[in-house]
Every structure is written in structure tokens, then in C-alpha cells.
Image: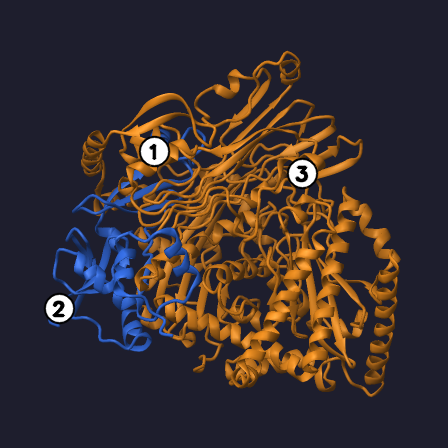
Chain colours: A blue, B orange
């Protein structure tokens, strides 16, 4: 039996249209071998720009192919952050919650971190102002580069597919 | 004892005598108890050599049993697995504590003679790997020679430095023989209620070192011919406040181990010993391959990084055992996962700070066991679950850090506080990989800080010395998933079968009647998908004498992290009351507090007179409570996923109705404008009132909030400039924070280099610390190491840097992951894995 789902199911996963029973089955059952290609296809159909998606990078963010073999990190609103192997957070907007008042907008009194010990760093897309990541760190902590996918190994060795390029 | 039981016991004794005679004959021939006449140590060395030479477990490049007769292979494996689950389900009925009977805090494993797990039961399976370490310790420290490993022997261990998370997890191990050969080990663990630490409860928090952690039974033989030594039975009962409970727990473990022995014996009879041996080896190799295959199918190769923290505040606490322990600690856990081309994992905690004078330190067994349970429950739930996954992972745990103290002076009674907090980023690593591959149904922001721990003891309602350890904490909110909210009050990561337990059952063993139990609002992290809600129980104290209680959990720091714009869960706090008027309120049938749903409302304080303590810390040391005192047990929520402004407004209203969120946060956090349409309506929660969304106002408010974000935020480049100056000038950084950085920088040159280069600090930059902080670091660094193992296993190589540290690149300073591709570039000494 082929371990795969119809494209429509993956489209529904992307569009948040699956009910819990379907999701539960997907969790407990097989992992489909062609999921990546189907999800990439579904996402490519839904973005409003033409750059080929190389891979989904984080919620709202993609690694996309650009001319001259470049790959950049791009938001679904169209904002481009940086080269794919750089830390997109360095190009984002930031708001730091580091006072009792800042915390108490989100959490009741006594149910939030102590501002001397921990701050919340909120990273927004400069384009659409979507909140893309929140880091809770000690004050003074360097900005973390969370994810560096090995795109070459993934495409060349794991799925044996060509890496999408801007021309093709 | 029934006639049947007597007959079975007699049969078992006769069988053991027969087996012992065969072992004696082998000894007389100069042979060991291993296979083909080898000693156990020789057998393990050979297995390690073969594994290293071929990068296949025991040199198994093929799996003939599985490949030639897959149905029989699966039948045999399922038979073992079924036997282990049955042993657990049956034996837990022997136990008396709700910890084991209700919460299911026990598990069983079946191991190869060399101590690698073949199959596991359900339950708190973190201990599968810790038992593995304990068996390997006995082998590598020549237990075959002394005290001897014989048919019918019974061993106990609860020493974290040998193989355990913390001393309250007591394990029983029995060797299983066939025709004079050791063919397997059966092992079981229960979480016992009191280990005789300096304070009552299984995980006391006031001690600075091992010497206050409770009794340690370090891989001891405690019986033979399946009978416990008289000396053991007379010994341990005085080393606990709850001897009867420990006695029953021990019988639970013995029952389970003997049931597993039966299963193995039956299998040998049915399939033959050679097939059993082949299955044992192949199952581990199969587990290793299954892990790698699953990773290549669902994850993305590359490097994942994160960091987590948790607080352990002791400055000014009462009842500390050492003056120098009167200080605050912060756990710093940089977490790096490298998924190699071949699908194996490399997990590194390089940069972790020094261990401390608190009972939250960890040993490698605890870290590896903990991460193993998380991986088996998340990455490979459908694959063969055993130590094969361990063979597909390398762990770098810096010696001298909280993650690998290599010092038997350190305390470990509640190692979970750091352990659970430290693996929070691992969830995120996995989730980032799943996101990229499109397996969105698997994405999960993380797990709750598994607290509060209600513990204590004294003279109980029956007039007896007693200790309590509420395991309501086995039931926390889980992390938000990409496709749905986290589960409210559902589980704890260390026990996939966790449960809050029946209040009535807790009341039978604890003199702490429940005044209320409810979902606790605003505990789950906000997000498009919220973290699962925590809950709270308000307990009073009744019919006690010299009764102590204390709290344990995070307070000043949230240890989990939100994902993709979701927020971390709320932190803990402490709420107690003593000298209350609760008795009078009962007599006069007046209102009394049942909850603390809204800590800002003043409702609790309005409903009770007394000496009330409300403070934002999460840890307290044992303090006396008298009858009608009050204690809030607040169990945490999970972290959220995604931007809260993307949450469906109707879900926000459900959050209010379900008691997961106080109404005033709907607009503040989610931009959802709600109005109360009915003041008295009741939902299935402690929240009163019916709310409805104002859709137009919500659209407007959300749009405005996006604008406010833009006004409030600044480009990271600008912020970095300001922040760099702040660090360079050490402005607005408290001593506890600077001490934590200094500790990591002294322990790890890599982290020091990373920190200095990121903030463009001089090469010789060091934080200016107070005299007290300097002394604290000096005392701890001067303590050096006191390792427990004389002879390490090959599996320890990745963290064992006692003499010659393996090269571990710190990629936080080097973005070129190509330099990391493959084991050669990482842990050097391990060979590259072959194709499966």
C-alpha cells in the first residue's frame, strides 16, 4: 500500500480544514514519503509571489530561490529578510518585555517571569507586523540562530530531488 | 499465602537451585556466566567492539530473524512487549501509594545481558535507560566476581551517579539465566514516597549536597534465591519515613520482575534459546535503524539551536543545610541538535553552567534517559522502542556542569527541575524540522514545567510519622500543537500515562483535604494555538502534628518557550495561609476559599482571615503548617504556538468559558473584543457568565494592535546597538544573571568566545561579580570531580572528557554547518554509520 495522502488532504492540512479524527489518524498512522513535495506545492499555490519555495522555514517564513543561485528567507507577505543561512531575526523588528507592566499585559500578577531574571523578546515581520517568534531569555543573552537546514544534503541525498531555482 | 502461591514459590526455588548448579559447573570449568563461556565483562567488551567496528549494534549488519520470518519476529517482540505491559498493570495493584497505583509511576524493562533494553512497558519509561546504565555499571565493576551474579539474585539501585534520575526512583534488577548462561535482565522502577532525605517527601529541596538527599542504595545485591536478605529488610525500613509504602513498592517491583522472567522462560520454551538470543540482539539493532529511518523521513538535516533557563532561588530561604548554599541559582541550558546526513542525532549542552548547591543537578543517565523518553514518545512512537534509539544519538554533556556533575557530592533529589526545563528547546528543534518537512500534525511547542510539587510530612491523621508527595503534577498542560491547542491538565513529559489522581484517594493518604480543584486561568501560553491549561487544588491541613509542607517549581523564570510567535506558559507562585479562621467558617457555614483563579482579584484574601503568604517565587523549603492552614497546589500550563492575533475569536470565547482565561485578557492578548451577555450562565468550569465576540470591534482592535506593534518595536539592528553598550558597561544586570554568564564562560571556552564575539567584547572580558558570587563560583569550581565510574562504557565517550576531551564544535560561533556534516566532524571517535 503506498504511504501517501491525496494532495487535497495536504491542502486541507495547510488550510486548517482537517477535523480532529483525520489529524489523529495522520499522527498515529504512517508518515507519507511525499509529504514534503505536496506541502511545498500547496504553499506555492497560496503565496502571492512567484519565487520558488525551497522549503517552509517557520510559520509564515520560507526559504525561496532567487536568481543567481541565491536563496533568501521570505515572509508570506512578501518581505525578504536575509540570505537563507543568515539569522532572519537580525533583520526583524523587536519589542522587549522587561518590566512588570509589560508582563502584566499578558499574564496575571505573580504569574510571569521576574524582569531582572528574564525578558521576552518579540520578533515581528517589518512587512506585515506578524509576531513570528518570542524568545524568553536572561537579560543580555545573544540572539540565537535557531535553525540552519542543510538544504543540499536534504535535496541531494534524502529526497533526491533537484533544488528549486529561480529560473526553473 | 495461598497453596498455589506456596507451590509456585517452591517450584521457583527448585528451578533456581538447578540453574545455580549449572552456573557452578561452568565456573569449575573456568567459564563466566556470559554467552559461550565468556565473563559478562568480556561479552560486553566484545559487543562494544563489534558495534564500534561496524556501527551496527553487536555487528548485526543483517537481521536474519526479522528478514526471514517477519511474522514470527513481530510475534515474539509483541509477546515480550505484552508481557511487560501486563507485568506493570498487574503489579501496580500490589502498591499502596497513589503515586504508583493512580499515577502509574512505575515501569519495567527487559534487557540484554549487557544491559541494553530490548522491550519496555508503558509508564515512566525514562528509567529504561537509567536501568540500562545501572546494569552496565555492575558489569563494568566486576559484580560477576563480587558480590557475584547468580540465578535468583536481587539487586537494588537508586544512585543517580550509577543510573537513576534521582534517589526516590528505586529500581529492582534481577538476572535471568538459562542453562547456566545469563540471557537477560528484568528491571522495574517505582517512585517511592520518601527516601529519608533531610526533609520529608521523595524530593526534598533544602539540601546542598548528596548527604541530605536521602538514602542511596548503590547497585547492591539485596537477596538471593528470590528471597530478600534479612539484613536488607532490617536496614532500609529505618531509612525512610514511610517503610510500609516502600515495602509494598518493593513487592510491586519484585512481582513485575518475576512475571517478566516467566515471559522470557515461556518464550525460550516456545521458540528455543537461540531464537530468543537472536531476537534480543536484532530488536536493539532494529530500534536503532528505525530511529534513523524515521528521522530521515520526517526531519530536516541541519543544525537546530535554542536555550532554556529556570530559577532555583535559595537566598534567604530557611532551613538550608549550609551557609554557602544561601544563594540563587539559574540553570543555563544551551541546546544544540545536529541531525546528520545519516539520520543520527548529536545533542550538545556545551555552554551549560556549573552545578550548584541545590538538588536539581543531573547525571548523564538522567539526561540521556530523559531525552530518550521524549524521543521515543514523539519521534518514534510507532517504531520498536528500546535502547536502539540511544545508539543513534550522541550526547555531549560538559563535565562539571549541572548536566553532568561527575561529582558524587552533588545533590540530585529533584533533578527533573533542570532536566524538564533543559529539554524544552528539543521540542522546538523537532518541531522546526517537522515544519520544514510538512509534518505539521507533529509540531508541538513543548512541555510544561512539571510543578508545583506539594511535599511534606510529619505526624499524620493516623498519628503516624508520614511523608507526602502529591503527584497531581503528573497532570500538566501540554504544549500547543500547530494543528490544535495543547491538552489541558493532561500529562507530564516524564510519564506519558500520567494522571492527576482522584482527590478522594489522595485524601486517604494525605492529611490534606481538598477545598477546591479547578482549571487555572491564564496558565497556558497564549498563541494561535494555546498551551494546554494547568489546574490548581486548594488544600487545607487537618489532624496533624509538626507538619511540614513546601513548594517546588519555577517562579522567576518560565522554563518552556513558545513557538512561531506563541508565548511561554505562566510561571508559578506561592500561596499559603496559616493561623486561619477556616474552622470557625466551617462551623458557622460561612464562605471559605476554594480557589485562587484570579490572583489580582483579592477574592482569596477576602474569604479567609489569617497569616497569608503570597509571593512570586516557586520554591520554598519545609515550613510548619497547623490544622486549617491553606496551601495552593498550582500545576502549570504548556507553551503556545503562533501569533495570538491569528487565534479564532470564537476559540478565545471558549477559553473564557472553559476557565482557561480570565475575560480581561481576551482583548489585551488576542485583540478579541468580548462582551458579557449573561452574568449567571454556568459552563463546565469555575467561570461564571456567558460571553460573545464583537466581530467588528475585534477586527478594528486587531488592526490597531498591528499598528501599535510597529510603534512599539524597533529594528533589531538599533536594539543591538543599545544592548551592546549595556553589556559592555554591565548596566542593569543583576548579580545572579552575571554569575550565570560567568559560570558558563569559565566552564566553556566555546561559550565564552560566542558571548564575547556576539557583543563585541574584549577577549579578556569578564563580568564584575560581587564578592559573594565570586566565592560561590570559587567554591564550586574548586570542588573538582568525584566520579563514580572507574570503568566507563563506550557510550560514555561522547561526554567523558576526564582526560581527553573529544572534539565538540560549538557551532554558535561558526555558521558553516558543512564543517559539521557527519560524525567525523563532530565526535571524532565514532565511526561513520553504514547503510542499513
Q: Check chain identity for marks 3 and 2: say if they share one.
A: no
Chain bearing tag 3 is B
Q: Which mark is residue A166?
A: 2
Left or right of residue B647: residue B216 = right
Q: Is residue B177 above or below residue B502?
A: below
Give yes or no for contact between labels 3 and 2 (Cβ–Cβ under 8 Å). no
Residue occupying the far top of the picture: B588
Give yes or no for contact between labels 2 and 1 (Cβ–Cβ under 8 Å). no
Q: Which mark is residue B653?
A: 1
Q: Position of residue B443 (x, y in %)?
A: 38, 55
Q: State the SS at label 2.
A: loop
CA gap between label 2 and label 1 equals 45 Å
Depth check, mark 2 against mark 1: the one in front is 1
Res B228 seen here: no
Left or right of residue B153: residue A21 = left
Chain bearing tag 2 is A
Residue shown at the point (16%, 67%) measured from the top left:
A70
Q: Position of residue B610 (x, y in %)?
A: 60, 17
Q: Quadrant of residue B664?
A: top left
Between B437 and B82, the one lying in front of the other is B82
Amino acid at each position: 500500500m503506498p504511504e501517501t495522502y491525496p494532495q487535497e488532504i495536504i491542502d486541507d492540512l495547510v488550510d486548517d480544514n482537517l477535523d480532529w479524527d483525520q489529524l489523529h489518524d495522520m499522527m498515529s498512522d504512517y508518515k507519507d514519503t511525499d509529504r514534503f513535495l505536496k506541502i511545498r506545492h500547496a504553499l506555492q499555490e497560496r503565496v502571492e509571489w512567484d519565487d520558488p519555495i525551497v522549503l517552509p522555514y517557520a510559520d509564515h517564513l520560507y526559504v525561496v530561490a532567487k536568481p543567481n543561485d541565491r536563496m533568501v528567507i521570505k515572509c508570506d507577505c512578501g518581505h525578504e529578510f536575509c540570505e537563507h543561512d543568515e539569522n532572519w531575526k537580525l533583520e526583524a523588528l523587536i519589542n522587549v518585555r522587561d518590566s512588570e507592566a509589560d508582563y502584566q499585559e499578558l499574564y496575571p500578577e505573580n504569574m510571569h517571569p521576574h524582569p531582572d531574571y528574564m525578558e521576552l523578546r518579540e520578533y515581528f515581520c517589518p512587512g506585515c507586523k506578524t509576531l513570528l517568534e518570542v524568545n524568553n531569555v536572561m537579560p543580555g543573552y545573544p540572539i540565537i540562530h535557531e535553525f540552519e537546514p542543510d538544504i543540499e544534503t536534504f535535496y541531494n541525498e534524502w529526497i533526491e530531488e533537484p533544488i528549486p531555482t529561480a529560473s526553473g | 499465602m495461598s497453596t498455589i502461591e506456596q507451590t509456585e514459590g517452591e517450584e521457583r526455588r527448585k528451578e533456581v537451585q538447578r540453574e545455580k548448579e549449572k552456573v557452578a559447573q561452568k565456573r569449575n570449568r573456568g567459564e563466566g556466566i556470559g554467552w559461550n563461556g565468556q565473563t559478562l565483562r568480556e561479552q560486553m567488551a566484545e559487543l562494544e567492539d563489534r558495534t564500534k567496528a561496524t556501527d551496527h549494534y553487536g555487528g548485526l549488519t543483517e537481521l536474519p530473524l526479522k528478514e526471514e520470518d517477519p511474522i514470527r519476529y513481530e510475534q515474539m517482540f509483541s509477546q515480550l512487549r505484552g508481557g511487560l505491559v501486563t507485568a506493570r498493570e498487574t503489579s501496580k495493584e500490589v502498591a499502596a501509594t497513589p503515586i504508583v497505583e493512580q499515577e502509574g509511576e512505575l515501569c519495567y524493562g527487559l534487557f540484554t545481558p549487557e544491559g541494553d533494553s530490548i522491550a519496555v512497558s508503558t509508564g515512566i519509561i525514562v528509567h529504561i535507560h537509567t536501568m540500562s546504565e545501572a546494569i552496565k555499571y555492575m558489569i563494568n565493576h566486576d559484580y560477576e566476581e563480587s558480590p557475584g551474579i547468580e540465578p535468583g539474585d536481587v539487586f537494588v539501585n537508586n544512585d543517580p551517579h550509577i543510573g537513576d534520575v534521582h534517589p526516590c526512583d528505586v529500581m529492582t534488577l534481577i538476572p535471568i539465566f538459562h542453562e547456566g548462561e545469563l540471557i537477560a535482565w528484568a528491571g522495574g522502577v517505582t517512585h517511592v514516597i520518601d527516601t529519608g532525605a533531610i526533609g520529608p517527601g521523595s524530593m526534598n529541596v533544602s539540601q546542598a549536597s548528596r548527604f541530605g538527599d536521602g538514602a542511596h542504595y548503590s547497585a547492591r545485591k539485596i537477596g538471593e534465591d528470590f528471597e530478600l536478605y534479612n539484613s536488607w529488610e532490617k536496614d532500609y525500613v529505618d531509612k525512610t519515613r514511610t517503610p510500609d509504602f516502600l515495602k509494598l513498592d518493593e513487592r510491586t517491583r519484585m512481582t513485575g520482575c518475576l512475571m517478566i522472567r516467566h515471559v522470557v522462560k515461556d518464550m525460550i520454551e516456545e521458540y528455543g534459546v537461540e531464537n530468543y538470543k537472536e531476537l534480543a540482539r536484532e530488536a536493539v539493532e532494529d530500534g536503532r535503524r528505525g530511529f534513523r529511518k524515521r528521522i530521515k523521513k520526517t526531519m530536516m538535516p541541519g543544525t537546530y539551536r535554542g536555550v532554556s533557563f529556570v530559577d532555583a532561588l535559595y537566598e534567604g530561604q530557611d532551613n538550608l543545610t549550609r551557609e554557602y548554599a544561601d544563594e540563587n541559582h539559574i540553570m543555563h541550558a544551551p541546546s544544540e541538535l545536529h541531525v546528520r546526513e545519516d539520520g543520527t542525532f548529536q545533542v550538545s549542552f556545551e555552554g551549560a553552567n556549573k552545578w550548584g548547591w541545590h538538588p536539581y543537578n543531573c547525571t548523564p543517565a538522567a539526561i540521556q534517559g530523559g531525552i530518550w523518553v521524549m524521543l521515543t514518545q514523539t519521534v518514534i512512537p510507532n517504531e520498536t522502542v528500546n535502547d536502539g534509539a540511544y545508539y543513534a544519538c550522541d550526547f555531549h554533556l560538559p563535565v562539571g556542569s549541572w548536566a553532568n556533575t561527575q561529582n558524587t557530592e552533588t545533590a540530585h533529589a529533584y533533578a527533573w527541575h533542570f532536566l524538564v526545563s533543559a529539554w524544552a528547546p528539543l521540542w522546538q528543534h523537532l518541531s522546526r524540522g517537522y515544519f520544514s518537512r510538512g509534518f505539521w500534525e507533529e509540531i508541538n511547542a513543548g512541555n510544561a514545567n512539571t510543578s508545583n510539587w506539594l511535599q511534606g510530612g510529619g505526624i499524620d491523621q493516623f498519628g503516624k510519622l508520614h511523608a507526602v508527595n502529591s503527584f497531581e503534577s503528573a497532570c500538566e498542560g501540554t504544549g500547543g500543537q500547530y494543528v490544535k491547542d495543547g491538552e489541558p491538565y493532561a500529562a507530564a513529559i516524564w510519564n506519558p500515562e500520567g494522571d492527576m489522581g482522584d482527590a478522594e484517594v489522595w485524601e486517604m493518604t494525605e492529611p490534606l483535604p481538598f477545598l477546591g480543584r479547578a482549571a487555572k486561568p491564564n496558565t497556558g501560553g497564549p498563541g494561535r494555538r494555546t498551551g494546554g491549561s494547568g489546574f490548581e487544588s486548594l488544600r487545607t491541613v487537618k489532624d496533624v502534628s509538626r507538619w511540614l509542607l513546601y513548594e517546588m517549581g519555577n517562579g522567576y523564570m518560565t522554563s518552556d518557550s513558545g513557538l512561531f510567535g506563541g508565548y511561554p506558559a505562566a510561571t508559578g507562585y506561592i500561596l499559603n495561609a496559616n493561623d486561619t479562621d477556616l474552622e470557625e467558617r466551617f462551623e458557622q457555614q460561612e464562605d471559605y476559599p476554594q480557589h485562587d483563579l484570579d490572583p489580582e482579584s483579592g477574592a482569596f484574601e477576602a474569604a479567609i482571615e489569617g497569616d497569608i503568604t503570597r509571593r512570586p517565587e516557586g520554591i520554598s523549603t519545609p515550613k510548619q503548617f497547623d490544622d486549617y492552614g491553606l496551601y495552593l497546589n498550582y500545576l502549570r500550563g504548556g507553551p503556545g504556538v503562533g501569533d495570538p492575533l491569528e487565534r479564532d475569536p470564537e476559540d478565545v470565547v471558549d477559553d473564557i468559558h472553559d476557565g482557561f482565561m480570565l475575560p480581561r485578557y481576551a482583548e489585551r492578548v488576542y485583540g478579541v473584543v468580548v462582551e458579557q451577555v449573561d452574568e449567571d450562565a454556568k459552563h463546565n468550569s469555575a467561570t461564571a457568565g456567558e460571553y460573545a465576540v464583537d466581530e467588528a470591534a475585534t477586527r478594528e482592535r486587531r488592526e490597531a494592535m498591528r499598528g501599535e506593534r510597529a510603534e512599539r518595536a524597533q529594528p533589531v539592528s538599533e536594539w543591538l546597538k543599545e544592548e551592546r553598550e549595556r553589556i559592555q558597561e554591565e548596566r542593569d544586570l543583576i548579580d545572579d544573571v552575571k554569575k550565570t554568564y560567568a559560570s558558563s564562560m569559565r566552564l566553556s571556552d566555546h561559550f565564552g568566545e560566542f558571548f564575547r564575539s556576539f557583543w563585541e567584547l574584549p577577549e579578556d572580558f569578564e563580568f564584575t561579580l560581587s564578592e559573594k558570587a565570586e566565592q560561590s563560583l570559587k567554591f564550586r569550581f574548586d570542588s573538582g570531580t568525584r566520579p563514580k565510574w572507574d570503568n566507563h562504557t563506550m557510550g560514555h565517550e561522547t561526554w567523558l572528557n576526564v582526560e581527553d576531551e573529544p572534539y565538540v564544535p560549538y557551532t554558535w560561533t561558526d555558521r558553516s554547518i558543512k564543517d559539521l556534516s557527519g560524525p567525523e566532524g563532530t565526535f571524532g571517535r565514532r565511526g561513520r554509520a553504514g547503510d542499513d
